[in-house]
Amino acid sequence: MTAWTIRDFHSQDVEGILELWQSLRENGVDPVYDLSEVLASCEKDHAVVAIQGDQVVGAAVGRAAHDQGWIVFLATLPVLRGKGIGTLLLAAVENRMATHGLNKLSALMPETETRVEAFTNRGFVVKKNLRYFERRIPVQRAERGALEELGGRVLPRDLWDRVAGMAAEKELLERRLVMPLAESALAEEFGVVPPRAVVLFGPPGTGKTTFAKAIASRLEWPFVEVFPSRLAGESGGLAGALRQTFLEIAELEHVVVFIDEVEEIASRRSGEPPSPMQGVTNELLKIIPAFRDQPGRLLVCATNFIRSLDSAFLRHGRFDYVIPIGLPDDEARTAMWNRFIPESVLADVDVPRLVAASTGFSPADIEFAARSASQRALEKAVFDAGPGPGADGAVRRGPVTADYLETIAETKATVSDAVAQDFLEDIDALART
């Protein structure tokens, strides 16, 4: 007669599962599945436990999907290993899963696990030359409802790499923002407090929104943009709607919150009696410290007119950094033109001439000029004489250097000389990097 019995998992067995989990870790075995996944499968899938007296001394947990089954967890207390309990637990959980009509039952084991007799005893075969790939999904199922209510989304993972040029700005954002947030444990080890809030300022069209989205993409955090103009129509007024929005944001484990043209709700307070917008500014000044108390989140505010922001808004303790995003230099403009010119004609376009001709252009200006040149070339090909031969006599389909120079000449730069000079003065007076 054995000194243990095997039965189905009961909710009161959770403490026993925790003890088994801990015993594996203490013996140098790092289970493949997280503890939360094991406990979830205990409740929802198939689990059996070995009981000796009132103690859980072993457990096996399985999960079925279509005709494929997986052993999620198998463990016995160290003092009882080699007694055959693991083999019996595997048999029991396989019997519970038989109703699914499984064609295959598989298990993933860490390399540090050497006691695999239970599997070989049940006829499992070790598969050679296999690699295990794992990816963490950034937004859990429970958060998706809250994210959808806020109009947020998870952005494509490659946005950071798709930011053309702007190497200096990217490096600064990588070092100051992305790295401390992505490597929070390492940052803490060095005494670095990860940033919670940042202001991006600069002339219109310089890519502040693009950078905010790229940061969220780089971190793989959900991106939520707050639109004050939309909140203004709520029954509780803009201040109340803003407060409620940030309460809902607090339900997300990780998030990048973006407010564009923040000067609309954080402008300098003045006048008697106070204007209604001053109440909104006051509310935002209260929200930011509460937001900063929560880890795993970043507030990015963008403005074209940093001089108009309330002085209390920018002070230390609310924003970690105030970072300028300016016009692209020659290297950045070269990267942007190379990105926007079709690859089929890139070799025949005089990119250095375009770079020189577009001095003072913002990224938005360059993109507009490039798209306009492509449209112009398409119209010529369809409605005029058609595509002409290139230098090698072959027919070219696409814009040429002249098309780009024409659209550059016709594009009015978004940033005037006066605005560019004001920006340089703002860097000296207000930037904090």
Image: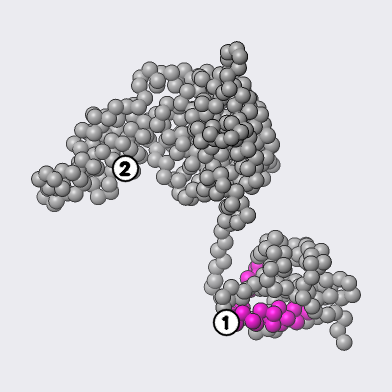
Residue bearing the label numbered 2? 340
Q: Give the residues in magenta.
A: 85-111
Q: Magenta stretch containing residue 103, yes or no?
A: yes
Q: Position of residue 70 (x, y in %)?
A: 63, 73
Cα distance in 3D space between marks 1 and 2: 51 Å
State which quarter of the image contains the C terminus.
Answer: top right
Foreground residue among 291 and 415? 291
- Identity of the residue drawn at 57% across and 82% down: 103
Image position, residue 358 (x, y; %)? 29, 30
Residue located 58% across and 15% down the image? 270
x and y percentages locating residue 199 in the rendered image:
54, 30
In the rendered structure, which amino acid carries the disc numbered 1?
Asn
Q: From the viewer's perspective, is residue 104 above or below residue 176?
A: below
Which residue occupies the foreground of this view, 47 or 81? 47
Number of callouts: 2
Residue 390, horizontal then vertical, whole percent: 14, 46
* Front residue of this view, candidates 80 and 310: 310
Mark 2 element type: helix
Q: Quadrant of residue 112?
A: bottom right
Which residue is tagged 1?
A: 103
Q: Residue furthest top?
A: 272
The type of colouring in the image is one colour
Residue type indicated by callout 2: Phe
Q: Which quadrant of the figure has residue 232?
A: top right
> Which residue lies most toward the left here?
385
Residue pictured at 85% horizontal, 79% vertical: 4
Instruction: Tell me if I can see residue 70 in this picture.
Output: yes
Element under label 1? loop
